Amino acid sequence: MAFAFIQSSLAKRQQQHILRKRTLVDSSAGAMMTVDGSHYINFSGNDYLGQRQNMAVMQAWVDGISEYGVGSGASPLVTGHTRAHDELECYLAQNLGREKALLFNSGFAANQALCQALLHKDSLVVSDKLMHASFIEGAMHSNSAYTRFNHNDLNHLSHRLKDKKADTLVATEGVFSMDGDQGKLSEMSQLCTHNNAWLMVDDAHGIGVFGSRGLGSVEALGLSQHQVPIVMGTFGKAIGTAGAFIAGSANLIDYLINFAKHYVYSTAMPPALASATLASFKQIQDGEQQTKLHNHISLFTTLCKQAGIKVMPSTSAIQPVLMGNPEACLEASLRMRELGLWVAPIRYPTVPKGQDRLRITLSASHHQSDIEALVDVLQLVLPVHDVKS
C-alpha cells in the first residue's frame, strides 16, 4: 500500500505516549478558557501581557478593516504593502535602533526566509543547540555549513568559531521557548565582533516582555545594530496579534525584499493586523502590563520555593517543571485539568528525550489567586520526590 508508513508512524507515537493532538477551544476570555463545556485557568498560552483582548488593539483592528478590508489582496511587491505596514515597520526599526524592518506572516516564515536568502555554500551558521525548530530546519536545508554549540556555552561557541568562514552567522534566542531562560546576548555579541561574525537573535518570547518600550531583549540590553545585526521577533505572543519581523541594516532588508522567497511570493499580512499590532506596541509603552507579569513571575517562583517545587531557572513568563518521561508528564497534565487548570504536557520530540515537562506560562491576565491555585495543584499532582527539595 502506498505511503503505508503514515499509519505505522502514528501508531508508534501513540505507543510512546507522544502522539500530538489538537485541542478545540470553545472560547477564551482573559486567563480563562472553555473546552468541551468545562472552564479552565489557562497556564499554557503565550499571550504574556493579555494584549489579544485589549480594547484599543481590537478597535485598531476594526478600524483597519474599515479602511483596508480584511486582507491585503496581494504580495508586498505587487499592491500588498500599505501605509499600515510601513508605519509598523518604521516603528519597529526606530525603537530597536535599526535602519529598517521587514514584516512576515509568521516567525517560522521569517526564520526560513532568512536562512534561504542569506546562507550559501561558502558560509557557516552556528546556532545554540536549543534554537527553535524553524531556524534549525532552515539552516539544515540551506547550502551552508551548519553546526551547533551547547546551550549558552560561550567556550563551546568560541571553539566552533575557530572554523569560521568569511560569512559566518551565529544564531541564538533572547528567551528560549521551552526552558524559559535567556541567551547570553552581550557576551555573544562581543565574541562575534571579535571573530568578525554576525549575531542573529530570535526574540519571539522576549518581544513585549522585556525592554522599556516592550521591544524585547535587545532593547533591554541596549545592543546596537553593530552588536546584533539581525533581530527577529514575533507578534503572536506578548503583543497578542500575529506575524513577525526581521530588523537590521537597510542593505540587509533590501536584500531580503529581493531574494527572500518567503516574502516575495507570499500574500502580505492583512493591513488591519499591522494596525492592531502597532496599537498593541503603543499600549504597552507605559510598562504597566509588563510590571503585572513580572510580579506574577516573582510570586510564582517564591511560592514554588516555599513549597519545595523544583522549577527550571527562569525569570521569563515560561516556567517549566521537568517530569522526565512522557507518561508522567501526560498524567500530571490530565490531573491538573481535572482540577480546573490547563497546563500542556511538552514531550519528545519537541524537547530532548528525558526532558518531558509541564511548560507553565504566566500572563498579566492572571490574578494572584490563580497563581496560588497553580502552586497548590502542583503540590497535589507532582510525585513526592519531585516536589520535595
Image: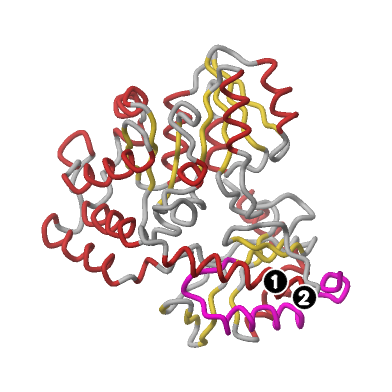
How many numbered dots are placed on residues in this image? 2
Q: Report the Cα–Cα distance between label 1 and label 2.
A: 6 Å
Contact, mark 1 vs mark 2 (Cβ under 8 Å): yes
Instruction: Judge by depth and name the residue closer to the eye, 176 or 195.
Output: 195
Residue 326, position in %: x, y? Answer: 75, 63
Q: Nearer the viewer, residue 224 or 2?
A: 224
Which residue is at 75% across, 29% downward? 155
Which quadrant holds the C terminus?
bottom right
SS assignment for the magenta stretch, majority: helix
Residue underneath mark 2: 306
Which residue is painted at 66% across and 80% down in the image? 336
Q: Is residue 375 magenta?
A: yes
Image point 52% across, 38% down: which residue?
A: 201
Q: State which region is magenta.
A: 361-389
- Label of residue 362 in the image: none
In the rendered structure, the answer to whether residue 153 lies left or right of residue 55 reads right
Query: Residue flagged by tag 1: what amino acid is it?
Result: Thr
The local crowd at label 2, few if under 14, some if 14 to 19, many if 20 or more residues have their Cα within 10 Å, is few
Image quarter for residue 187? top right
Q: Is residue 195 magenta?
A: no
Helix, strand or loop at disc 1? helix
Where residue 186 appears, as percent x and y from the top left, is 59, 35
Question: Callout 2: helix, strand or loop?
Answer: helix
Tell me the amino acid under the disc marked 2: Gln
Q: Position of residue 346 (x, y in %)?
A: 66, 61
Residue bearing mark 1: 302
- Examine the rendered structure and indicate whether residue 342 appears above or below residue 58: below
Residue 125 visible in the displayed image = yes
Quarter of the image where one finds residue 11: bottom right
